[in-house]
Structures are given as C-alpha cells and as structure tokens.
Image (spheres, helix red, strand yellow):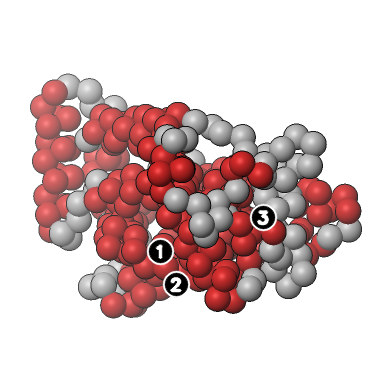
Amino acid sequence: MKNLFKGKRKLILFSLVLLVVAAGCANYVDPETKKTAEEFIIYSSTSFSEVWNEGWFAAIFIWPMSQLINWVGGLTNDAGIAIIVATVLINAILAVFSIKSQIAQQKMQMIQPEMTRIQNKYEGKTDQNSKMRMANEMQELYAKHNVNPFSSIIGMLVQFPVIIAIYYAVQRADIVVRGTFMGVDLTQTPLEGLSSGAYPLVVIFVLMIIFQYLSIKVPGWLAEKKKRESHIKTKDYANKQSGPDQMKMMSIVSTVMIGFIGFTWPTAMSFYWMVSSIVRILQNIIVNKFFIKD
C-alpha cells in the first residue's frame, strides 16, 4: 500500500514537471519596463491561431483563460473583479473533479485513526504475508467507508495545468496588464509594492498567505468536527505516530513555499490564489455539510 502511494506521488511530480516543460517556463516580461512585453499581451482581438504559434499549451490553456479575464474585465472595467469572476467560473468548471477530491480527502482524514491502528499493528513486519494482511485490512477499511484513496489524485492532476495557465494568463491578459483594481496596479509584485509604498499589494499578499493556510487546514478541522458530532472517539493508538504530523507539516511547508514564490510574482497571481483559496474553503464546508455522510 505504501508503495502505491509512493507511485502516485511520483506520478504527480512527473506530471507537474511535464506541464512546466510544456508551458515552456516562458518569460513574458520586458526586462526594461518590467511589464509584459507588447508582443505577448493577449487582447480581446488576439486569435487562437496567433497564440497557437507559441505552442499547444499557450493556445489551449492560456489563451481561453486570458480571454475570459478580458471579457469579464470589459464588462466591469476592473482587473480585480475580472480575476474574481474568472476564478469563480474556472473553479465551477473544475468542481466536478475538485468536489470528488475533497470528499475523498475528508473521508481519508476521518478514517485516519483506523489506518494508523492497522499500520501500527504491522509496524516492523517486513515479511510478505504481513504486508499482504495489512493491504487486505486497508482495503476492507476503504470498502467499509466507501473510500477510494486515490480519487483525490484526479482532482490534483486536472488542476495542475489550470494553475500554470492562470499564472501566465494574469500576466498576459490585456485588462490586467493595462488595468487596475481599485487604483492598484496588479502587475507589480508584493516586493515592488513594499519598496514603493503601494501597501495594498502587500495586504493582498498577506491575505493570500492566510487563506492558503486556511484552505489546507479547514478539511482537517471539519473532519474533527464531524467525528465529534458522530461521537467518534480517537483511540490511543491513533496518537502513536511513527513520524511527525504530516498534515501539519504539509500546511506549513506549502504555505511557506507559496509565500516565498508569491513575494516575487505579479500581485494579480496572488489575487487569483487568494480568491481560489476562499473558493476551496467554501467548497470544503459545502462538501462536509451535504456530501459527507456519517
């Protein structure tokens, strides 16, 4: 079972590397102006075929997202509102995958004590029979609670190209490049905002960090709440972990990584990430209330 999880992690990592390569790690910023170079700006009039010349990833993923942002921005005349609406629409499209992923994630957290008991039961046993018995008990546990431990992987794989594409889309969409949000230039980085005194950019960055952290922690909190409401007591064996709390470590490491990267990327991306995190939090609350059965 552990080998299966390791295999899935390798698959995710490999897919992410492929997508980064597919995206070309392109640099669309003019080194002199520090803005998106004119030839890379996607206007409402920019055709699919024009972007196709850059590559399939730009045409299939970046172009439609940029045009969605431009379209909404044309209606609202505000880059920030365009990003908000585009983010909500994109997450609505991905909901079919993300909700299933969130259901699986919360169910896995609810049965974590039983998983820990089984793992502790066979701890240190390396013979083939013990491994088979542990795998069988795990499968019986998943079947009992109707859990597919790998169903969350699908949602993650689907969201990878979206994350990369939206990163470039908010840099290239005309409404973002030339527009503002409440008078703030979202093409500037939080670092530039800090040095120039444009503190709203720093506020957006800080809020992104907060909501990113909450989006990771909320599923665990909801799972604990569900267990309390169902009068499920955590057994002593559930606390006998052989290693550190992986969820807590993931929350901290992920947030630090996003913060480190986000301090030097366009604030438009931080704005998108903040709104997307809020949407994920709301989705988790909805999933916990209406989709997770006791």
Q: Which secondary structure, mark 3?
A: helix
Inspect this view and state whether residue 2 appears.
Answer: no
Contact (CB < 8 A) between labels 2 and 3? no
Q: Distance between the residues labelled 1 and 2?
A: 11 Å
Closer to us: 25 or 146: 25
Residue placed farthest to the top in the image? 127
Residue type at mark 2 is Leu
The quarter in which the N terminus is drawn is: top left
Residue type at mark 1 is Asn
Q: Which secondary structure, mark 1?
A: helix
**In percent of the image, x 76 and y 65: which residue is there?**
184
Query: What label sits on residue 91 in the rendered view?
Result: 1
Query: What label sits on residue 282 in the rendered view?
Result: 2
Q: Identify residue for label 3.
A: 177
Closer to us: 131 or 201: 201
CA neighbours of label 3 inside 10 A, class few (<14), some (14 to 19), many (20+): many
Percent x, y of residue 60: 37, 46
